[in-house]
Image (cartoon, rainbow, N blue to C red):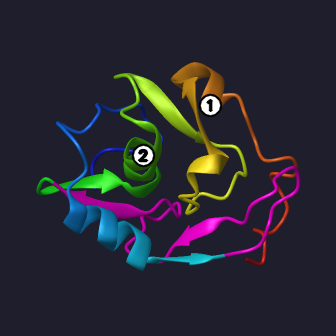
């Protein structure tokens, strides 16, 4: 895929179709609860890129799964704004773990222990 998944993108052109919403939820499983959160990660088990970000086809285009989840549950993010994983789990699509940040701010954030092994969930 040519587009890097963490770059800010454009909102999808309309509501998420029911078929895509079903695929989004069918291809995730509940993981562990990360520090600082009351809810578990929803781990995307569909296709992922080399960095671990999930992808799903919507409107015939490959889209970043966490951005689709954000739009489905919270509404379309503004163009040019990044959907940030507060839990720092790249394949998490739990809308409670997702927030909006300017791209420059999102790039400056790192997992609490960026050198540590990924969480076991």
Q: Tell me, for residue 107, which label it has, or none.
A: 1
Q: Tell me, for residue 8, which label it has, or none.
A: none
**Which secondary structure, mark 1?**
helix
Taking the magenta stretch, the answer to whether it contains residue 120 is no
**Which secondary structure, mark 2?**
helix
Q: CA distance from mark 1 to mark 2?
A: 16 Å
- At 23% from the left edge and 62% from the top edge, which residue is drawn? 18
Task: Indicate whether 32 appears above or below 92.
Answer: below
Classed neighbour count for the residue bearing mark 2: other residues with Cα under 10 Å, few (<14), some (14–19), many (≥20): many
Q: Quadrant of the N terminus?
A: bottom left
Sequence-wise first label, 1 or 2 = 2
User: Seen in the image, is 39 located left or right of residue 89?
Assistant: right
Report x, y in % for residue 50: 47, 65
Number of callouts: 2
Q: What is the span of residues highlighted in magenta in the rendered image?
A: 31-58
User: Residue under circle 2?
Assistant: 67
- At 37% from the left edge and 73% from the top edge, which residue is drawn? 47
Taking the magenta stretch, the answer to whether it contains residue 35 is yes
Instruction: Give residue 92's quadrant in the image.
Output: bottom right
- At 78% from the left edge and 47% from the top edge, which residue is drawn? 111
């Amino acid at each position: 895929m040519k587009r890097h998944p963490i770059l800010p993108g454009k909102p999808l052109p309309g509501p998420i179709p029911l078929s895509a919403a079903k695929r989004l939820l069918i291809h995730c499983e509940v993981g562990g609860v990360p520090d600082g959160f009351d809810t578990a990660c929803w781990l995307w088990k569909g296709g992922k890129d080399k960095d671990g970000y999930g992808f799903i086809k919507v409107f015939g285009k490959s889209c970043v799964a966490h951005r689709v989840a954000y739009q489905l549950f919270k509404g379309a993010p503004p163009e040019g704004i990044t959907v940030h994983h507060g839990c720092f789990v790249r394949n998490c699509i739990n809308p409670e773990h997702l927030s909006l940040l300017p791209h420059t701010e999102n790039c400056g954030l790192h997992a609490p222990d960026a050198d540590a092994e990924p969480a076991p969930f």
